[in-house]
Amino acid sequence: MEEQRLFYPLDLEITDELEFKLIKIGVIQSGKINQKLMNQLLLLGLKKYDEKESEVGKS
């Protein structure tokens, strides 16, 4: 069975600081990315981005 890869429309550069934060909140565990938590984090980020964009459009 071929490994399934997910492609995001973002060029994510994982800096040391970001990697530390992801480990701290449990997205990276034992050197592996918890895909479910990463997806939730990305969706939350996109939701926040959409909220900001809609606020900009109102003014």
Image (cartoon, helix red, strand yellow):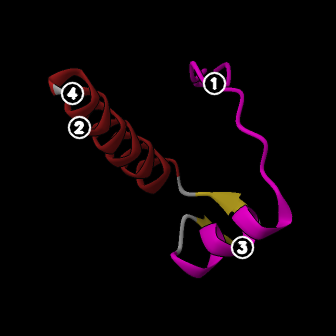
Q: Tag 2 or tag 1, which sits nearer the N-term?
A: 1
Q: Indicate the amino acid at tag 4.
A: Ser
Q: CA distance from mark 2 to mark 3?
A: 34 Å
Is 56 above or below relative to 29?
Answer: above
**Mark 1 or mark 2, whichever is nearer to me:** 2
Task: From the image, tell me which residue sits under label 2.
Answer: 51
- Which residue of the protein is positioned furthest toward the left in this rendering? 58
Q: CA distance from mark 4 to mark 2?
A: 5 Å
Is 59 above or below relative to 13?
Answer: above
* Residue 35 percent coordinates (x, y): 51, 47
Q: Indicate the amino acid at tag 2.
A: Glu
Q: Residue at x 84, y 66 (%)?
A: 16
- Which residue of the protein is positioned furthest toward the front in this rendering? 59
Q: Which one is in front, 45 or 7?
A: 45
Q: Main secondary structure of the magenta part?
A: loop
- How many residues crowd around disc 3 within 10 Å: few (fewer than 14), some, or many (20 or more)? few
The circle on residue 54 is 4
Indicate the quadrant containing the N terminus: top left, top right, bottom left or bottom right.
top right
The circle on residue 5 is 1
| SS for dot 2 | helix
Q: Residue at x 15, y 25 (%)?
A: 58
Q: CA distance from mark 3 to mark 1?
A: 19 Å
Magenta residues, as a range?
Answer: 1-25
**Mark 4 or mark 3, whichever is nearer to me:** 4
Q: Indicate the amino acid at tag 1.
A: Arg
- Evaluate if marks 4 and 2 touch, with contact meaning CB atoms under 8 Å apart: yes
Task: From the image, tell me which residue sits under label 3.
Answer: 30
The circle on residue 35 is none
* Residue 17 percent coordinates (x, y): 77, 69
* Residue 38 percent coordinates (x, y): 49, 50
